[in-house]
Amino acid sequence: MEVKIDTKEKFTVVTPIQPELSANIAAIIAKNCDEQLQKQVKNVVLNMANVSNIDEPASDTISELQQKFYEFGASFVICCLQPSVEEFFEKTELLELLNITPTESEAWDIVQMEEIERELLDGDDMEFDKNA
């Protein structure tokens, strides 16, 4: 098994098992995440605690996944980055673009905040439509 999947109430945690996150493993993660977007609980936390090395195609896949999730109105948060992976994201100018937290608990907080934000924005749209 290349990744561990743990389903929670409001999100699913996807954890790569191997220390190397290659394009092939990133493709497996992308497939699992695409399947997650079809479920009621769409939010994903990518726990990178076990990953000490990532290649550029894999980092591109991760970045594209995050964008896709936000386009579908779902959260995609990365947590527990190892320093070497964080440095790689910094060098490839992805660090500032990705939604990254130090811990899984903080990732859960981000998911909750984004859920509330989406609910409020949806609520505003409804109120706006009523006043039109």
Image (cartoon, helix red, strand yellow):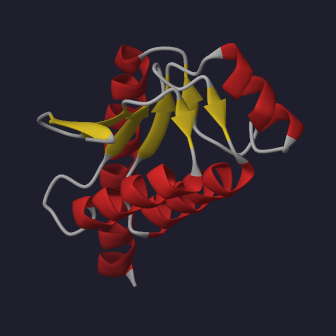
Q: Position of residue 64 (x, y in %)?
A: 59, 62
Given residues 110 and 66, the one toward you in this image is: 66
Residue at 33% x, 44% y is 44
Check the picture and name the quadrant holding the C terminus.
Answer: bottom left
Given residues 67 and 17, the one toward you in this image is: 17
Where residue 121 sits, quadrant-wise, is: bottom left
Residue at 48% x, 69% y is 71
Q: Position of residue 97 (x, y in %)?
A: 71, 46
Q: How many marks?
A: 0
Is 22 displayed left or right of 31 in the figure?
Answer: right
Residue at 17% x, 52% y is 41
Given residues 111 and 116, the one toward you in this image is: 111
Residue at 52% x, 54% y is 66
Is 46 displayed left or right of 98 in the figure?
Answer: left
Q: Looking at the image, is 49 positioned above or below residue 62?
A: above
Q: Position of residue 100 (x, y in %)?
A: 58, 30
Q: Looking at the image, is 10 positioned above or below residue 85?
A: below
Where residue 35 sits, quadrant-wise, is: bottom left
Check the picture and name the quadrant holding the N terminus.
Answer: top left
Is 117 displayed left or right of 11 in the figure?
Answer: right
